[in-house]
């Protein structure tokens, strides 16, 4: 009898600690989900004389992928994006975050360019508006320009197939 | 020579002091206000550091952003709202009281009440067992004899 209380306390504590092991403290829920994607107008990476603005994408479901040549885990997800672009399911736009134009262009040449185009966010201001804090990040934006999903960290095949692609299909039906 | 070297080595740690990450600011008053605000905000990259002390690039950018907004004449609350709109309540070291944070705010008091209740319950139980023990006259005599015996042994 006298052991029951400590035993229960121990089990409860263990359960909490066990759950804690599988939580990622770097995944902070974004307050931007369900809100309009912040407007921006930035020069394009490949053609700096042209601008790209998020408003152009009204009426389309699209992905905004924040990347940079200095970002290590971007290399991890990049082949998945290249493959996704080849399948032509959803347009992927890039946001080259806090990067030198030369480095960004070289990186795309080296690793392949899955993006319809990349906007160059040299100063990282658009990144701040989108609440970017760990590159890579990927946003799913619907036809009304509302952010429906945010992937923090690299897109894995699992995330792509179980979350992003079903969501894109659903949003396209609307 | 050796002694001089030892003295020099002893003095060396004096130079190894840490301080807040400093940005060159043209306006020290504004800088002070910015640091004051940023000390209560969390850096999202290195989560156990404040925005004021972090050397992460994002923290640099956010300090720049805060500085610029202060120059535009925005209040501290407006700037905090601006950051919360982008990064969520997580940037605040002092989370607001709302549905999702009730447990966080009031959980410790709940635990305290629980512990206090348990404590008093145990105390009452113990007192009862103590009052319940009444000795028969023989037992009391035996106890007194034993205690005396014990005293003799010690003496």
Image (cartoon, rainbow, N blue to C red):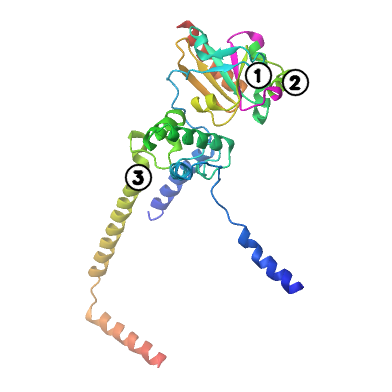
Q: Is residue A42 left or right of residue A103?
A: left
Magenta span? A86-103
Query: Label for residue B136?
Result: none
Q: Is residue B132 left or right of residue B75?
A: left
Using the rendered image, report if marks 3 and 2 lie on a common chain.
no
Please give the chain letter of the residue carrying mark 1: A
Closer to us: B45 or B125 = B45
Distance CA(mark 1)–CA(mark 2) = 15 Å
Q: Is residue A109 above or below residue A17?
A: above
The answer to whether the residues at label 3 and label 2 have Cβ atoms under 8 Å apart is no
Outermost front residue: B26
Q: Which residue is mark 1?
A: A80
Tag 1 secondary structure? helix
Q: Which residue is mark 3?
A: B107
Q: Looking at the picture, how far across and down is residue B55, in whole percent?
A: 58, 42
| Residue at (48, 36) in percent of width and height | B67
């Amino acid at each position: 009898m006298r052991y029951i209380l400590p035993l229960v306390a121990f089990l409860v504590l263990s359960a909490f600690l066990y759950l804690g092991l599988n939580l990622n403290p770097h995944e902070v829920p974004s307050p931007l989900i369900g809100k309009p994607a912040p407007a921006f107008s930035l020069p394009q990476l490949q053609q700096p004389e042209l601008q790209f603005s998020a408003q152009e994408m009204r009426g389309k479901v699209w992905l905004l992928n924040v990347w940079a040549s200095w970002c290590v885990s971007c290399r991890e997800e990049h082949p998945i994006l290249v493959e996704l672009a080849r399948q032509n399911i959803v347009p992927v736009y890039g946001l080259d975050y806090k990067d030198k134009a030369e480095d960004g262009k070289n990186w795309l040449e080296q690793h392949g360019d899955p993006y319809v185009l990349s906007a160059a966010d040299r100063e990282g201001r658009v990144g701040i508006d989108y609440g970017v804090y760990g590159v890579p990040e990927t946003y799913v934006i619907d036809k009304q320009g509302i952010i429906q999903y945010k992937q923090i960290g690299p897109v894995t095949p699992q995330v792509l197939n179980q979350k992003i692609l079903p969501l894109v299909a659903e949003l396209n039906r609307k | 020579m050796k002694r001089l070297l030892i003295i020099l080595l002893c003095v060396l740690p004096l130079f190894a002091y840490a301080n807040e990450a400093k940005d060159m600011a043209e306006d020290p008053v504004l800088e002070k206000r910015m640091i004051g605000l940023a000390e209560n905000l969390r850096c999202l990259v290195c989560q156990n550091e404040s925005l004021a002390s972090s050397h992460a690039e994002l923290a640099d950018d956010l300090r720049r952003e805060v500085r610029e907004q202060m120059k535009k004449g925005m209040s501290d609350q407006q700037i905090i709202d601006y950051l919360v709109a982008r990064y969520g309540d997580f940037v605040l070291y002092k989370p607001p009281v709302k549905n999702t944070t009730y447990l966080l705010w009031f959980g410790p008091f709940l635990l305290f009440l629980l512990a206090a209740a348990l404590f008093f319950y145990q105390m009452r139980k113990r007192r009862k067992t103590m009052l319940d023990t009444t000795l028969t006259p023989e037992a009391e005599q035996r106890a007194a004899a034993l205690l005396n015996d014990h005293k003799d042994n010690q003496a």
